[in-house]
Image (cartoon, rainbow, N blue to C red):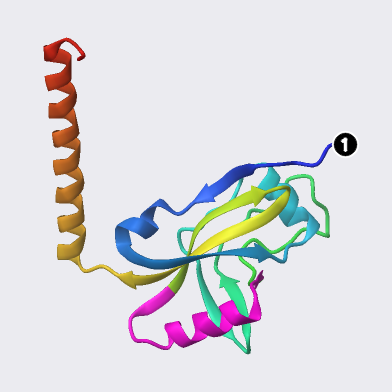
Amino acid sequence: MPRETGRKLIAQNKRARHDFFIEDTYEAGLVLTGTEVKSLRAGKANLTDGYASVEGGEVWLINVYIPEYSQGTWTNHAARRTRKLLLHRKEIGKLDATLKEKGLTLIPLSMYFKDGRAKIEIGIARGKKDYDKRQTLMEKQASREMARAMSNAVRRRGGR
């Protein structure tokens, strides 16, 4: 059987970029059991309530939902168990020092298979206030309208 290559997206946390300013991102490996991998290969996971924390020199992924494998038996995993993330020691030290700053948290942004191995992209995030969310929405709408106006102008000129 040939090895997998490329990147296959499993789940994405779309609310993260709406609710937080993402300051920095890291790619980490996951320590998983066999039935968790099978559930992920079926494309099932939910990152919305998840977060990560640094405890004892290790990074842990907390409250991420990977459903039980449908054909699993008594070896099935707990759906919301705490999972260990695999990062380099220097990255963990940098994360720990950064997270000590007030108002920062570590959230999962996306989960994917990269060359056959389960990876997760985590981001250092600062929470947005309501007025920040409104401002971001207005900027997004303005850029959409500008792009729409530009495409209409090009269409009227005859595509030159």
Numbered disc total = 1
Residue 105 screen position, x and y as percent: 42, 76
Start-end of magenta stretch: 84-105
Q: Secondary structure at mark 1?
A: loop
Say above or below: 155 vs 44: above
| Three-letter amino acid code of the residue under disc 1 | Met
**Image height of 44 relative to 77, above or below:** above
Q: Quadrant of residue 141?
A: top left
Q: Position of residue 160 (x, y in %)?
A: 20, 15
Image position of 132 with respect to 10: above or below: below
Whether residue 69 is visible here, answered yes or no, is no
Horizontal side of 29 relative to 140 (left or right) equals right
Q: Residue furthest right?
A: 1
**Residue at the spot of label 1:** 1
Quick check: 98 left or right of 151?
right
The structure residue drawn at horizontal position 19% and vertical position 37%, both measured from the top left corner, is 144
Q: Quadrant of the N terminus?
A: top right
Q: Residue at x 46, y 63 (%)?
A: 49
Residue 5 visible (yes or no): yes
